[in-house]
């Protein structure tokens, strides 16, 4: 009976994780737009006193912290219940992009589909350019710096494995990659979430991960 119940409980906890992640992503994305004055604000009740005392800047910071905390809690909850980190991370990325799109569309006058598509393409290109040009930031977080160093080392290992056609090394890199993303990235991201250099951290992280993904798509000869 216990063996039947545990998987069901884990599945339920995973579903809860997605719900918490969605709320966190919403609060984070909306809060990130409140650094400049708005004509109206969507304020969680728990943060109303913060807005009344500290204004829109305080509200923005509080929502970023709350959103980051909820997303990390969801990530931690999901992985502790045997969930693969890549699933919750992918969900968070999609949720954040979706909320940003909603905020963007609801905060401007109606436009044509062509204008919306052009704007999305423009922002995608801008983001891609920022990632491509990103340089390793000098962070005031030992945890984040160590994570980036491990990520760079892993990139070099992947490159060597592919260059030398060393499948055993490649498999070892895959295992290291999964651990790095599921554990180290989550911890570093949590610590950097409320820091000014968070964007620089994310951009450089994306740049290195993009290179690693190219190696991970490598097709072995004879397969």
Image: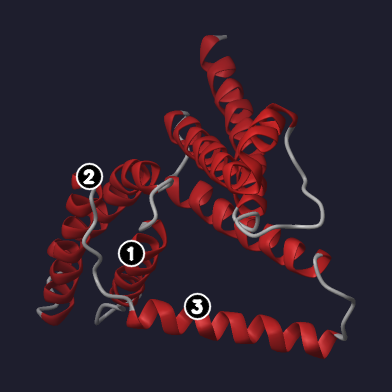
Looking at marks 3 and 2 on the same chain, the residue that comes earlier in the sequence is marked by 3
In the rendered image, the vertical position of residue 199 relative to residue 51, given as above or below? below
Question: What is the C-alpha distance between the residues marked 2 and 1?
Answer: 14 Å
18 and 55: which is toward the camera:
55
Q: From the top left corner, tell me how far across and down residue 141 is, in percent.
A: 23, 47
Question: What is the C-alpha distance between the residues marked 3 and 1?
Answer: 13 Å
The N terminus: image quadrant: top right
Residue 106 numbered mark, or none: none
Assess whether mark 1 and mark 2 are in contact (beta carbons under 8 angstroms): no
Q: From the top left corner, tell me how far across and down residue 69 is, in percent.
A: 50, 36
Q: Residue at x 61, y 86 (%)?
A: 122
Left or right: residue 202 compared with residue 147: right
In the rendered image, the vertical position of residue 134 relative to residue 186, given as above or below? below
In the image as oriented, which residue stretches furthest toward the top? 1
- Pointer 3 residue: 127
Looking at marks 2 and 1 on the same chain, the residue that comes earlier in the sequence is marked by 2
6 and 61: which is toward the camera:
61
Quick one: label 1, few (<14), some, or many (20+) residues within 10 Å? Answer: many
The C terminus: image quadrant: bottom left
Left or right: residue 178 compared with residue 160: right
Q: How is the image coloured?
A: secondary structure
Question: What is the C-alpha distance between the residues marked 3 and 2?
Answer: 25 Å
Secondary element at image label 3: helix
- Pointer 1 residue: 205
Quick one: label 3, few (<14), some, or many (20+) residues within 10 Å? Answer: few
Looking at marks 3 and 1 on the same chain, the residue that comes earlier in the sequence is marked by 3
36 and 188: which is toward the camera:
36
Secondary element at image label 2: helix
- Pointer 2 residue: 143
């Amino acid at each position: 009976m216990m063996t039947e119940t545990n998987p069901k409980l884990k599945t339920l906890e995973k579903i809860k994780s997605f719900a918490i992640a969605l709320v966190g992503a919403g609060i984070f994305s909306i809060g990130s737009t409140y650094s400049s004055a708005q004509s109206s604000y969507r304020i969680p009740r728990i943060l109303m006193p913060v807005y009344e005392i500290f204004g829109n800047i305080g509200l923005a910071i509080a929502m970023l912290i709350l959103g980051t905390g909820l997303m990390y809690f969801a990530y931690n909850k999901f992985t502790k219940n045997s969930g693969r980190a890549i699933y919750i991370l992918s969900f968070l990325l999609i949720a954040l992009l979706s909320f940003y799109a909603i905020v963007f569309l609801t905060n401007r006058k109606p436009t044509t589909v062509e204008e919306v598509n052009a704007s999305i393409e423009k922002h995608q290109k801008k983001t891609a350019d920022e990632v491509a040009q990103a340089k390793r930031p000098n962070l005031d977080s030992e945890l984040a710096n160590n994570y980036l160093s491990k990520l760079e080392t892993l990139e070099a290992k992947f490159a060597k494995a592919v260059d030398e056609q060393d499948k055993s090394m490649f498999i070892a890199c895959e295992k290291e990659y999964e651990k790095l993303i599921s554990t180290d990235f989550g911890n570093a991201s949590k610590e950097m979430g409320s820091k000014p250099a968070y964007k620089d951290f994310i951009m450089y992280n994306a740049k290195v991960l993009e290179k690693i993904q190219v190696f991970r798509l490598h097709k072995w000869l004879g397969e």
